[in-house]
Image (cartoon, helix red, strand yellow):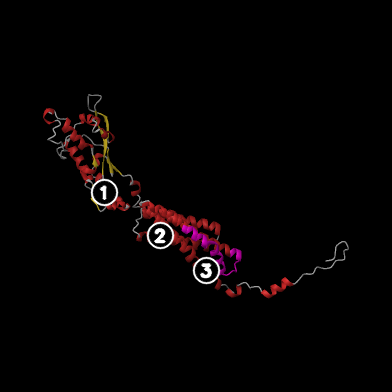
């Protein structure tokens, strides 16, 4: 529904002015496009039409002839035959059948009248409705809002403006790609800084950041395949999903880095990876399953917002686990293996020697004999 505020209606007793106002309303009613079409006069609340019927019914001086004639139904005149009388407007607004129009009309004291109680029209608004299957799509609703504004701009003498309850969000659609990549980039940079504070390793932070960037690109790509447009709801779900996508790659990178510290810089990459996955893999799968189950409960509500949020979060969780448990470990162990093999003395020379089992058993079997003492106040051992 479009709500059109007419701030400077002017002197509607002038037939040309009234006709132009009616043309404005007719054009708003007849707007159509790929998004849908208007309901026409049936879906419009415009007080001038009821006021015309009121004047026909109660404004005639020959009441004995025309008043309340059941065989002669009162209909709205055509736009060029409508009349408007300023002095009867206040009576129209107080009539029980039409008193609801007081919420649409604002009066003021008449400027050029000798009657101190005389009032005239100051401003008013009218509403008109539209329908279409494509209006569930945010981009199509944005096209509809632009069509409304184009019509309003054609009548600047009325000082009109159009209001739509979702207009604040629809105005963001044109700038949505820029806002999205800026938000993704800002979140990614902040995540990288936080990871660097705790990891203090540029190599590990770079790998985790690239994983998050890959997850974001995957979410946007698959959502486009699912015919989900980039609208404010998708953008909000995307930003929330970035927070989830940071989790698993950061955990894997952190535990892999901690394993290299605990086992020493000479530990083989396979040992670090085993230590890392043994700590992260199963909890990550549990977290993924619980998150998907919780989010899927939104599907019980038939809302576009819920559908987009579920799709985005399920994609985020799946891609996050694939990157954190498959791609990221593979990249880490591959690069570490290359670095291990390129050491100056070779990987085999730097590998720590395994202790001999037989010599260890011999050391356990040997007994250390303490020196004998000649002190008499202690028993001999």
Looking at marks 2 and 3 on the same chain, the residue that comes earlier in the sequence is marked by 2
Could you tell me residue 295's position as x and y percent?
Answer: 43, 54
> What's the CA distance linking mark 3 and mark 1?
57 Å
- Residue under numbered circle 3: 333
Query: Residue at horizontal 40%, vertical 59%?
Result: 219
Q: Is residue 277 magenta?
A: yes
Count the marks: 3
Q: Is residue 308 left or right of residue 360?
A: left
Q: Nearer the viewer, mark 2 or mark 1?
A: 1
Vertical comparison of 20 with 205: above or below: above
- Residue under numbered circle 2: 219
Looking at marks 3 and 1 on the same chain, the residue that comes earlier in the sequence is marked by 1
- Asked if the residues shown at circle 2 and circle 1 are in contact, with their CB atoms under 8 angstroms apart, the answer is no
Query: Residue at horizontal 20%, vertical 29%?
Result: 88
Q: Quadrant of the N terminus?
A: top left
In the rendered structure, find residue 131 and report the number of the disc placed on it.
1
Vertical comparison of 162 with 252: above or below: above
Q: Is residue 115 left or right of residue 290?
A: left
Q: Is residue 245 left or right of residue 106?
A: right
> Which segment is the magenta one?
260-289
In the structure shown, which secondary structural element does the residue marked by tag 3 occupy?
Answer: helix
């Amino acid at each position: 529904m479009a709500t059109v505020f007419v701030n400077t209606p002017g002197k509607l007793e002038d037939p040309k002015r009234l006709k132009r106002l009616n043309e404005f309303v007719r054009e708003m009613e007849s707007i159509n496009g790929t998004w849908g079409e208007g309901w026409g006069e049936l879906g419009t609340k415009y007080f001038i039409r009821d006021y015309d019927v009121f004047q026909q019914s109660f404004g005639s001086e020959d009441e004995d002839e025309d008043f309340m004639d059941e065989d002669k139904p009162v209909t709205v005149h055509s736009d060029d035959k409508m009349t408007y009388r300023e002095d009867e407007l206040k009576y129209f607004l107080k009539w029980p059948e039409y008193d609801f129009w007081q919420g649409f009309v604002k009066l003021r004291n008449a400027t050029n009248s000798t009657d101190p109680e005389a009032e005239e029209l100051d401003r008013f608004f009218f509403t008109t409705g539209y329908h279409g299957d494509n209006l569930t799509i945010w981009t199509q609703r944005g096209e509809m809002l632009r069509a409304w504004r184009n019509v309003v701009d054609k009548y600047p003498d009325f000082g009109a403006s159009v209001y739509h309850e979702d207009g604040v969000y629809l105005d963001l659609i044109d700038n949505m790609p820029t806002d999205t990549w800026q938000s993704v980039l800002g979140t990614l940079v902040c995540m990288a800084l936080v990871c660097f504070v705790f990891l203090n390793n540029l190599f590990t932070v770079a790998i985790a950041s690239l994983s998050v960037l890959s997850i974001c690109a995957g979410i946007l790509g698959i959502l486009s395949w699912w015919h989900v447009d980039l609208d404010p709801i998708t953008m909000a779900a995307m930003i929330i999903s970035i927070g989830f996508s940071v989790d698993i790659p950061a955990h894997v990178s952190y535990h892999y880095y901690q394993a290299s510290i605990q086992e020493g810089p000479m530990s083989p990459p396979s040992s670090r990876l085993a230590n890392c996955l043994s700590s992260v893999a199963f909890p990550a799968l549990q977290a993924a399953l619980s998150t998907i189950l919780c989010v899927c409960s939104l599907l019980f509500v038939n809302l576009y917002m819920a559908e987009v949020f579920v799709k985005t979060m399920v994609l985020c969780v799946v891609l996050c686990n694939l990157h954190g448990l498959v791609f990221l470990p593979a990249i880490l162990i591959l690069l570490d293996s290359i670095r291990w093999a390129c050491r100056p003395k070779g990987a085999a020379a730097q590998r720590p020697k395994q202790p001999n089992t037989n010599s260890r058993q011999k050391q356990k079997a040997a007994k250390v004999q303490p020196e004998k003492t000649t002190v008499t106040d202690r028993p001999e051992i």
